[in-house]
Image (cartoon, grey):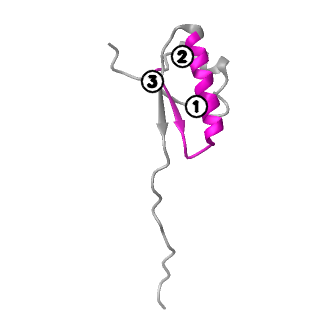
Amino acid sequence: MKKTKIVCTIGPKTESEEKLTQLLDAGMNVMRLNFSHGDYEEHGQRINNLRSVCAKTGKQAAILLDTKGPEIPHHEIRRRQ
């Protein structure tokens, strides 16, 4: 069992079936989707593309969803004069 994983963040430039096939052939084990960018429809299409490529190639890959974490509120602090 392989313990090392190759995680690739997938976005507009790497979401095509052709690119995903190349990434799988190069050793990608995990497709990471950054939910701070894009919407559910875009990410859904990326998942569908990966599933299609896996079915065609017989390879497997996990899907990692990186959700947007809580934001830390910040305020500008002005110096007293």
* C-beta proximity under 8 Å, tags 1 and 2: no
Circle 1 is placed at which residue position?
10
Q: Residue at x 46, y 51 (%)?
A: 69
- Residue 42: say if magenta: yes
State which tag comes first along the sequence, 1 or 2.
1
Q: Quadrant of residue 55?
A: top right
SS at mark 3 in the image: loop
Q: Is residue 59 above or below residue 81?
A: above
State which tag comes first along the sequence, 2 or 3.
3
Q: Is residue 20 above or below residue 8?
A: above
Circle 2 is placed at which residue position?
24
- Residue 49: say if magenta: yes
SS at mark 1 in the image: loop
Residue closest to the eye, 32 or 39: 39
Residue closest to the eye, 65 or 11: 65
Q: Residue at x 61, y 40 (%)?
A: 40
* C-beta proximity under 8 Å, tags 1 and 3: no
Mark 3 surroundings within 10 Å by alpha-carbon count, few (fewer than 14), some (14 through 19), many (20 or more): few
Distance between mark 1 and mark 3 Cα atoms: 12 Å
* Horizontal and vertical percent position of residue 59: 50, 11
Q: Residue at x 49, y 16 (%)?
A: 27
Magenta stretch bounds: 29-55
Mark 1 surroundings within 10 Å by alpha-carbon count, few (fewer than 14), some (14 through 19), many (20 or more): some
Q: For the residue marked with disc 3, what is the amino acid?
A: Ile
Q: For the residue marked with disc 2, what is the amino acid?
A: Leu
Circle 3 is placed at which residue position?
6
